[in-house]
């Protein structure tokens, strides 16, 4: 059993005692009779600047539950002093692309603010930012199990993650391609979430991301 003609991968996956290292991260859930619950993947684990290990998936799932009008959530914090989030909103499918979206809001995202009918408008809408801030506050106050797991800042993008193009941000099974998102929005992450002098912790950023990811407006 193992990888065909690949002793290195086989040894890394199956140890000398026969244990299979799946790469999953889990916990014994006391609410389910101490059954093993998968909480994420080891390779997705974030290690903060303070050395805290943080699994992003449970945080993202909690935020999606608290904020049903958002589409995607990605937690960032590897090597950083605090955690931050990127949020995207639900948009109408683009009939001219496979797996892409238009700028028009769709579904539950239409019910947050009467003044915003597009993702571009919503990313700069104070009502939307208040909605997301309330969800982040609820998570920080009621769900974060340690200070290291609290969200300190967030940004709402003016587009949803999609499967379209040669460099999609999500897979066909709706899993985040984290390395792709980090690369595409590196400028936004570095400047808005972590580098802007006027940003304070637990504060949102009003952002309009241009076609090349440039920052057009921060307040």
Image (spheres, rainbow, N blue to C red):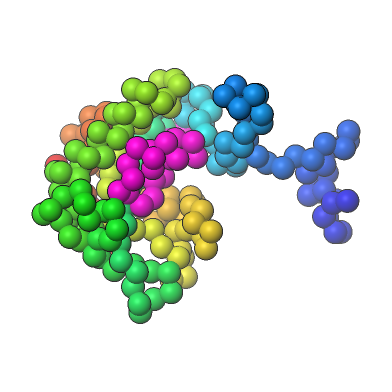
Q: Position of residue 16 (x, y in %)?
A: 88, 35
Is 4 magenta? The answer is no
Count the marks: how many?
Answer: 0
At horizontal 15% and vertical 56% (from top left) the residue drawn is 116
Q: Position of residue 114 (x, y in %)?
A: 12, 53
Nearest to the observer: residue 44 or residue 215: 44
Nearest to the observer: residue 7 or residue 37: 37
In the picture provided, is 146 more to the left or to the right than 136? right
Above or below for 145 versus 9: above
At horizontal 26% and vertical 40% (from top left) the residue drawn is 132
Above or below for 53 versus 3: above
Q: Can residue 190 be seen in the rendering of this structure?
A: no
In the picture provided, is 32 more to the left or to the right than 46? right
Above or below for 140 versus 163: above
In the picture provided, is 109 more to the left or to the right than 117? right
Q: Position of residue 49 (x, y in %)?
A: 45, 27
Nearest to the observer: residue 200 or residue 55: 55
In the picture provided, is 83 more to the left or to the right than 18? left
Residues in magenta? 57-79
Q: Can residue 125 be seen in the rendering of this structure?
A: yes
Q: Quadrant of residue 118?
A: bottom left
Outermost residue toward the bottom in this view: 96
Q: Position of residue 62 (x, y in %)?
A: 42, 36
Above or below for 173 versus 217: below
At horizontal 49% and vertical 36% (from top left) the residue drawn is 58
């Amino acid at each position: 059993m193992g990888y065909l003609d690949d002793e290195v991968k086989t040894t890394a996956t199956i140890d000398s005692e026969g244990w299979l290292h799946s790469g999953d991260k889990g916990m014994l859930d006391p609410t389910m009779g101490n059954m093993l619950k998968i909480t994420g993947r080891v390779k997705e684990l974030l290690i903060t600047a303070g050395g805290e290990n943080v699994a992003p998936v449970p945080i993202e799932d909690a935020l999606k539950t608290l904020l049903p009008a958002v589409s995607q959530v990605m937690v960032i914090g590897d090597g950083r002093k605090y955690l931050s989030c990127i949020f995207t909103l639900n948009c109408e499918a683009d009939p001219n692309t496979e797996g892409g979206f238009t700028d028009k809001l769709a579904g539950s995202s239409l019910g947050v603010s009467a003044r915003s009918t597009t993702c571009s408008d919503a990313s700069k809408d104070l009502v939307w930012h208040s909605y997301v801030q309330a969800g982040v506050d609820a998570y920080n106050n009621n769900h974060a199990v340690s200070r290291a797991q609290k969200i300190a800042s967030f940004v709402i993008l003016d587009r949803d993650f999609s499967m379209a193009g040669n460099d999609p941000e999500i897979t066909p099974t709706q899993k985040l391609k984290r390395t792709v998102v980090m690369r595409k929005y590196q400028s936004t992450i570095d400047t808005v979430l972590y580098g802007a002098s006027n940003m304070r912790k637990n504060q949102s950023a009003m952002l309009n991301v241009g076609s090349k990811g440039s920052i057009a407006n921060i307040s």
